[in-house]
Each structure stands twice: as C-alpha cells, then as structure tokens.
Image (tube, grey):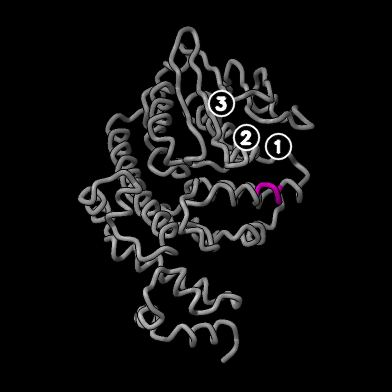
Amino acid sequence: MWGNKSGQTMKQMVTSSSGWIVAVSRALTAAGCDVESMFAAAELDLAQATDPNSRFPVEQMARVWRAAVVETGDEALGLRVADYVKPTTFHALGYAMLASGTLREAFKRLESYFTIVSDAGTLVFEEGEPECRLLLQRSSNEAGRPVASDQALDAFVASILGICRDLHQPDFAPLRVELGRAQPAKIAPYESLFDCPVTFGMPATNLYFSTSELDQPLPTANAELAVQSDKVVRDYLSRLQLEDVVGLVKAKVIDMLPDSEPSQERVADALHLSLRSLQRKLSQAGTSYTQVLEGVRHELAEQYLQQSHLSVSEICFMLGFASLSSFSRAFKRWTGVSPAHYRADRLGLS
C-alpha cells in the first residue's frame, strides 16, 4: 500500500493520498521536470499512484519538491498543482465537498476528514462572524522542521482555493491569507493567485473568508451524494486506522527483536492495549500477531542478508531467533532457500 521502495514499510510514516501525488506529478511534468527520475531518486514508486488506496511518505515527497525547485528555479512551483486537482484527488472527500450545500459545509467536511488527504499536519475550521478561518499547522520532525515542504503547503492552499472557485465563483477570493512559510524571493505569483493581501513567515497558515459568502448555496449541491461520499470516506479512514495499528505493532516488534522473540503480551503492553484488544484490532485488519511477526522477520532477514558485513549468526540474533537452525528453517519456509543460498544469489556470489 505504501508508495516507497526503501524498506520503510516497517516505520510509522506521515503520508499523503495517492490522488494528491497524481496531481503533484502532473504539475511537475507540465513544468518540465523529469518526474520519474525525481521519484526514483527519492525511493518512491510513482506507478503506485494509480492505486487510489495507496499512500506516499511525505518526507520523501519533500525530496521530490526540493529537486523540482532546483530544476525549475521556481519557488512558487507548488501553486501550479491547483490546475491539476480533480474531485478524485482527495478520494471520496472530493465528491463530498463537491456535493456540499455551501462552502461552509464543504470546509466542515475537510476539517473532519483531513487525514484522508494527509496526516502531515492539522486543519481546523473556525466559524465566526463576520469571518471564518481555515487554519493549517504543519507537523514537525525530530529536528523541529516541518515534515511537509513549503511547496507542498503552497500546493494544498492553492488547491483549496481552486476547489472553492470551481464550486462557487471563478473570482472567489479569501479576505486575506497568512502563510506559515518563509517569504519567497518573488511574492507576485501568490498575490496574483489569491487576489487578496498575503503575509508570509507566520507560525501557522490561516485563510480568512467572509462568512456570508461561505453560506451562499452551491450549484453542485447534492445531499444524497454528499452522505454517500461521507460513508466512503469513513470506511476508508477506518481501514487506514487499522493499518496504522499494524504499523505500530511492526515498529514495536522491530524495537524488541534484538532482545528475544517479542511476545504479543509485551507488544500489547507497550502499545497500552489489552491483549484481547490488540488481537481484535489485528483481526479486523485481516491479520494476526503471528503473521505480523513472521512478516517483519522475513522482510528484515532479506534486507540484512544483502548487507555483506553482517554474518548470518548476527542476523539470527538481530531477529530474535533462539538458534541458527531455527532461523534457517524459518527462512527456508519463507523463501524456499537457505539464508546462505539467498545471500550468495543476491550478492552475485553463486
């Protein structure tokens, strides 16, 4: 499901939807970027963007954005993404917003289901009179820097405005915009697109709108379609949450493996879950603790065996096996060959 090729499926990642990646890749292609090479350099599989349920790591996408800015010399490159956003870009949320009765209603849906787009930050819709505010705060990594790039932020804000103009009026504009990013060398593209006062260098991103305009009826309103789309969104997010549980279990297993084979009781305790609750969540995700443990060991074993400086005995210890023979039996069950045979084949030693 994850759109990366670097083995990071074992870690909890901040991700964005594949529909968003499609819009980004089309915008970069139109700007003259070698998108396939950029994605490959960032260890991302662009082909997976055709799967509407796949997700892409945001930090690796930031590498794509950096390469694109270097290649084009355009700091405002993200603003172009809005031209390539379609209803399916945000999965079923796009249709739910399209079918909303008003922009206020559409923004409420965006706030409720924002994680379908990305979990690289938080989005809050604050209602008031005579204006409402859409607040976006990017999450930070361990170094204290935003996980999502400035260009990704620009792209999202521009896309939200583009959706509003598609649903309401082509000349729709916010009252003012505050961007939680450093001021670029050229601000004219931002002022031209937003058609309102734009401030940079703010702690968070804020878009202010006239409340009365947000309450204007939309010509695309369809209450039945909106309700059905909401259900599709909730079902998708439920699946995503279950996959998050599987990811958390994998991460704990990896942390505990060098000590010994981690029991599901230890993992459940580390996740602050009862054993029964952990088993139920994994079952709902279509797997079991044994399957997760086996999967982690299998994937890590293949990765480690391709690192020539690690001995098979060391790998056996790193994966929590009690003996070399038990590791060899397990590996042959997974792959049909012994660890030594697999290593020789992969390293060209056979």
Indicate which disc, 2 or 3, sits on the residue closer to the N terminus. Answer: 2
The quadrant of the image that shows the C terminus is bottom right
Circle 1 is placed at which residue position? 76
Q: Residue furthest bottom?
A: 350
Residue 325 against residue 145 in the figure, above or below = below
Question: Is there a contact, CB below 8 Å, between mark 1 and mark 3?
Answer: no
Amino acid type at image mark 3: Pro
Indicate which disc, 2 or 1, sits on the residue closer to the N terminus. Answer: 1
- Look at the numbered disc 3 and give the secondary structure of its residue: loop
Q: How crowded is the residue under tag 2: few (<14 C-alpha within 10 Å), some, or many (20+)? A: many
Q: Is residue 221 magenta?
A: no
Q: CA distance from mark 2 to mark 1?
A: 7 Å
Residue 100 against residue 242 in the figure, above or below = above
Circle 3 is placed at which residue position? 170
Circle 2 is placed at which residue position? 154
Residue 83 is at least partly visible in this image? no
Residue 257 against residue 311 in the figure, above or below = above
Q: How crowded is the residue under tag 3: few (<14 C-alpha within 10 Å), some, or many (20+)? A: few
Which quarter of the figure has residue 162?
Answer: top right
Question: Is there a contact, CB below 8 Å, between mark 2 and mark 1?
Answer: yes
Q: Which labelled disc corresponds to residue 252?
A: none
- Look at the numbered disc 2 and give the secondary structure of its residue: helix
Amino acid type at image mark 2: Asp
The magenta segment is 64-68
Residue 136 is at least partly visible in this image? yes
The quadrant of the image that shows the N terminus is bottom left
> Residue 336: horizontal and vertical position, in percent?
38, 85
Name the residue: 47% across, 47% down.
Answer: 17
> Residue 81: horizontal and vertical position, in percent?
60, 41
